[in-house]
Amino acid sequence: ATRITPRCVRVRLAAPGSPEADHARRPRTLSDCERAFERVYAKPVYPPYSMIVDEIFSSLALTLSDSRFEYTPLFALGLHSLMRDGLVIPPTLKRGVDKRTPDTALATAVCAALDLDFSVVERDADAVREWASSLTEQDMLAIMGQESAEVAVAAKVTAAEAEATAAEGTQAAAAGGEGAAAGDERQGLRSRFSRLFRRGPGSSGIAPSPAADELRALADSKYPFYHLCIGLGLFELMAAVDASPRTEAVSRWASALGLKESKVKRDWDWLQTTMDKLFDVEERKLDDEVRALRKRANELQAQADEAKRAADEAEGIRPAATAEGPSESPEESRARQEAEAELGEALADLEKGTDAPPPQK
């Protein structure tokens, strides 16, 4: 038999620390993400929040492996907003229900399973929020190339003024008067007009930002790479600039960016449905705690009534109390005082729980 020797195949290895090496290290499948998560987070995840973790892994496992994927500020904003609102420390009556505290340890483990650094994601997301805090929806649409009606009218007026001034300068130059001065003035108006209305990071008084560049790139792209975190980042920007009504804003922004409106609306509906379910579960958990406190309060009240009855019976068979001592035995007195103290604490917790507002949506 003839023995066939396999040919030697050269494999080009990516340099350590290069984008190719970083891309190759990312998990490829959902099971890879889950195993990586279990290695860094051994504690069980509260069931309502586990569905958020599952959605992040199922959505991003393939997204991060896509050759078109790039880590961007909008991606960081979308991922961080979902972890901030969907991965929180379960509210309790003793901890307080007026605000939801993000679970930083859980979010850090989720990012580690995706080969991301939570501190970097949080830093980049906060930078985008700070940049957007001074803008309006009109500014955002202008960044995307959808200039408002006021800007269009101002452009027409300024263009007409520039043409009139240029005509006057031409007449003055033909008359041999101040031709040179008129020409300089005409050139200055042209420069002013081009600076005012050209598209760029600093146009319309908008501060330059990588997020602005990303929005422009999305709007200019013929085939934009859209995924869940891009949509979540857009929703967070809508909230930052107070775009309302929100459902109509989703349509406006999708049209301005050239995205499929059906995909963006699907992610918007998923976010609203998921968060509503999450809030309902948290409210039911608080209701269960209130019922447990009421049950415990009833039990303690029964124990206190029993202790008082026993004390009254003991008073009837013992001599009257003297000024120096109690009318009940020390054991009975101590048991009654402990029951009354525990009853007071339970009633206080119960009152606190019933008066506290539901979790903020």
Image (cartoon, rainbow, N blue to C red):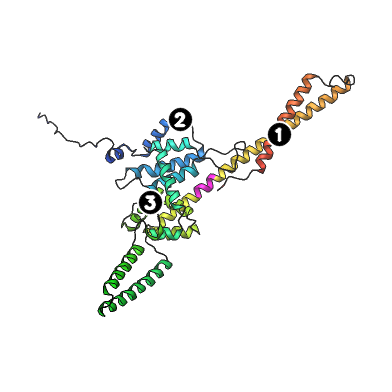
Q: Residue 316's quadrant in the figure?
A: top right
Q: What is the CA distance from the residue labelled 3 to the residue labelled 1?
A: 57 Å
For label 1, the SS is helix
Viewer-proximal residue among 226 and 140? 140
Residue type beneath disc 3: Ser
Instruction: Report whether 210 appears left or right of 309.
Output: left
Instruction: Report whether 77 appears left or right of 187.
Output: right
Instruction: Report whether 320 appears left or right of 11.
Output: right
Name the N-terminal-most of marks 3 and 2: 2
Write the start and end of the magenta stretch as one range: 273-278
Q: Label 3 crowding class (10 Å Cα cut-off): few <14, some 14-19, many 20+?
A: some
Q: Quadrant of the N terminus?
A: top left
Residue drawn at x 78%, y 26% as measured from the top left: 307
Mark 3 or mark 1, which is nearer to you? Answer: 3
Label 1 sits on residue = 297
Q: Residue 219's quadrant in the figure?
A: bottom left
Q: What is the CA distance from the residue labelled 3 to the residue labelled 2?
A: 39 Å
Asked if the residue at tag 2 contacts the one at tag 3, i.e. Cβ–Cβ closer than 8 Å, the answer is: no
Residue 9 picture location, percent across and down: 16, 35
Residue 253 visible in this rendered orientation of the protein: no
Residue type beneath disc 1: Ala
Q: Main secondary structure of the magenta part?
A: helix
Residue 314 picture location, percent across and down: 85, 22
Label 3 sits on residue = 209
Q: Is residue 211 magenta?
A: no
- Checking the image for residue 42, the label placed there is 2
For label 2, the SS is loop
Residue type beneath disc 2: Ala
